[in-house]
């Protein structure tokens, strides 16, 4: 049984998983929105929100903790300079997951993960409408 086991393993060893999730968080910081599988998006969200919390603290120790996890200087700079100040008034819930349809090649469920303070683009609005239409038919 998986009671109280929070780690989503994603079929990878711990080192590979940690580096992949850190890379996804860096991509989210850089591009403000990434398209990935639903399982990866759900695994990335806690780490991304933790990084924003560190960015909101803004002190040197928080910056060093963020760099220890992300390992990319440009991502840490952008996190502390742009992303965290936008979320300064929020208490939490900095990320949004927008479900898309299945991927054509292997039918893996796809999703966008993006910052909540970003405006919803017509593309993601269209994707949510398509998903809602598919779910109505079931």
Image (cartoon, rainbow, N blue to C red):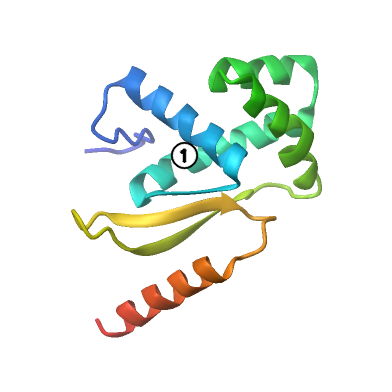
Where's residue 54, x and y in %? 69, 29
Horizontal and vertical percent position of residue 77: 72, 26
Q: Position of residue 133 (x, y in %)?
A: 36, 82
| Label 1 crowd (10 A; few <14 / some 14-19 / many >=20) | many
Question: In this rendering, would 20 be left or right of 34?
Answer: left
Residue named by callout 1: 44
Q: Which quadrant is the N terminus positioned in?
A: top left
Q: Residue furthest left?
A: 106
Does the image show residue 47? no
On the image, the x and y values in percent for residue 113 come to 50, 51
Residue at image location 63% in from the left, 22% down from the top: 66
* Residue 40, picture quadrant: top left
Quadrant where the image shows the C terminus: bottom left
Residue drawn at 81 percent across, 49 percent down: 89
Could you tell whether 25 is left or right of 4 in the image?
Answer: right
Q: Is residue 113 visible?
A: yes
Which residue is found at the position 35% from the left and 26% from the top? 17
Image position of 83 with respect to 111: above or below:
above
Counting labels gives 1
Establish if 122 lies above or below 93: below
Residue 49 sits in quarter: top right
């Amino acid at each position: 049984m998986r009671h109280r086991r929070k780690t989503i393993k994603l079929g990878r060893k711990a080192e590979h998983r940690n580096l992949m999730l850190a890379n996804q968080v860096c991509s989210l910081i850089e591009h403000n929105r990434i398209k990935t599988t639903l399982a990866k998006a759900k695994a990335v969200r806690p780490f991304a929100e933790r990084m924003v919390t560190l960015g909101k603290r803004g002190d040197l120790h928080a910056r060093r903790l963020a760099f220890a996890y992300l390992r990319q200087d440009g991502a840490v700079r952008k996190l502390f300079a742009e992303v965290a100040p936008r979320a300064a008034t929020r208490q939490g819930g900095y990320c949004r997951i927008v479900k898309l349809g299945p991927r054509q090649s292997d039918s893996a469920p796809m999703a966008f993960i993006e910052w909540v303070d970003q405006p919803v683009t017509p593309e993601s609005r269209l994707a949510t409408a398509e998903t809602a239409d598919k779910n109505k038919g079931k």
